[in-house]
Amino acid sequence: MEQFLKIALRRTIIKINNPYPPDDFIVDYSDFLKVRDYLALYKFNPKVLHRLLLLTIELWHTEKRISRMSLLLCIRKYFFIGNESLDPHFFRTFDGEGQFSETTSSLLYSVSRMIFEEGERLSRKQQKEARQIASSILFGVAATAKEEEWLCAHYHLSEPMLNRLLRYPARSPAISQWARLHYEHKDFRTRRAELLSWIIDEAPTFEVSPQTLIDDFEVLNAQDLAAIKQYEAERNAKDIVDKELGDMLYRAPVVNEDLFFLEKYYHDSSSVELKLSRRFYGPHRRERYTPSPIPDFNELRKEFYENLEALHKITMIWAIFYSRLPQDQKVTLLKKYYSPGSAHSLFRVAKNMSNLTLLQWMLELG
């Protein structure tokens, strides 16, 4: 029988049975090789994940011929077997009583740190995928103060890593302190509600000031105007190259170094993109011949200032939702920010929280 058919048969049988793996399912690398094609078909056993993490750490610096990427891919798949019903806003982790052990959580952070700090063991192509794995296996995982401090110091490694910091699932004095220090930082103007949630964790009655929202708005306008200016310059440059040399570069093989340089430039600039800040408010108008909507800044400014009070309430609603306060405390705070202009956001939050008390309260308001 052909090998691929044997594997397919085993996978199908295991998938149908969906067995619970024993604690010693993976002890060494040879065990891993035997089950790596099938591990994701087994039920989740946190001790198996624990051992897989330990094995990866033990072998990371070995000179033996192993596949580190294969280990990382299996860790990610098995991690999400245990977290398959995760809600994007409410996190849960696992052991026998519904939590990862502190040791397993720390191991998840240790593997992620190795990927970022000792990635030379991987090829350049592998490093990009490994970094995605590093952030994904921290999804919803709380750990020790040491790991929290590492997140605060390394949020800049990738956008997913920033997400792990801002959406960290447990209260953390270290992250709240980081949020206070970065409260006015230009790079986090689009993450105002998440940043604010960490202040609310320690000071539940804290409110963002309308002036801060105005500053956010104007900083984003300036960034978008600069992005549009750069986009138009790149489009104009491409149009010139396209008009003068594009047809020749497209049709003719490159035969000299000058044309080779121009051809590389032509292809590098052939997909010029306009990247604007992410906003949850304001009208956008699609300009003719542009691949991305360009804001009408006059309309943006008019609508923003007309709706500043509602936007303030909406920001507070989402900040309270993202906070790690107890649900009953969240409900009390959320009710303060109800208005006709914020009702839709409050409904979305109450629905995501599955909070019948808040949903019923909104219904009774009529």
Image: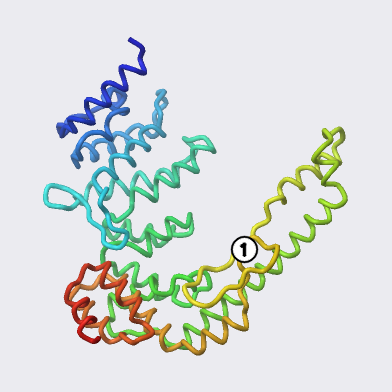
User: How many badges with numbers are in the image?
Assistant: 1
Neighbor class of circle 1 (other Cα within 10 Å; few <14, some 14-19, many 20+) is some
Q: Which residue is drawn at 51% across and 79% down?
A: 216
- Is 10 located above or below residue 143 in the figure? above
Out of 174 and 340, give the one closest to the viewer: 340
Residue marked by disc 1? 292
Out of 193 and 64, give the one closest to the viewer: 193
- Is 78 located above or below residue 161 in the figure? above
Q: Position of residue 252 (x, y in %)?
A: 84, 35
Q: Which residue is drawn at 58% across and 67% down?
A: 276
Farthest-out residue, left:
97
Q: Position of residue 109 (x, y in %)?
A: 33, 49
Q: Is residue 214 left or right of residue 204?
A: right
Q: Where is residue 179 in the image (x, y as percent from the top left)?
A: 39, 72
Mark 1 element type: loop
- Is 329 located above or below residue 103 in the figure? below
Three-letter code for the amino acid on which mark 1 is drawn = Ser
**Based on the displayed image, in which of its 4 quarters is residue 63 positioned?**
top left
Q: Is residue 328 left or right of residue 251?
A: left
- Is 183 located above or below residue 337 in the figure? above
Farthest-out residue, top:
1
Q: Where is residue 300 in the image (x, y as percent from the top left)?
A: 57, 81
**Based on the displayed image, in which of its 4 quarters is residue 133 positioned?**
top left
Q: Is residue 323 left or right of residue 264?
A: left
The quarter in which the C terminus is drawn is: bottom left
**Based on the displayed image, in which of its 4 quarters is residue 1 positioned?**
top left
Out of 162 and 42, give the one closest to the viewer: 42
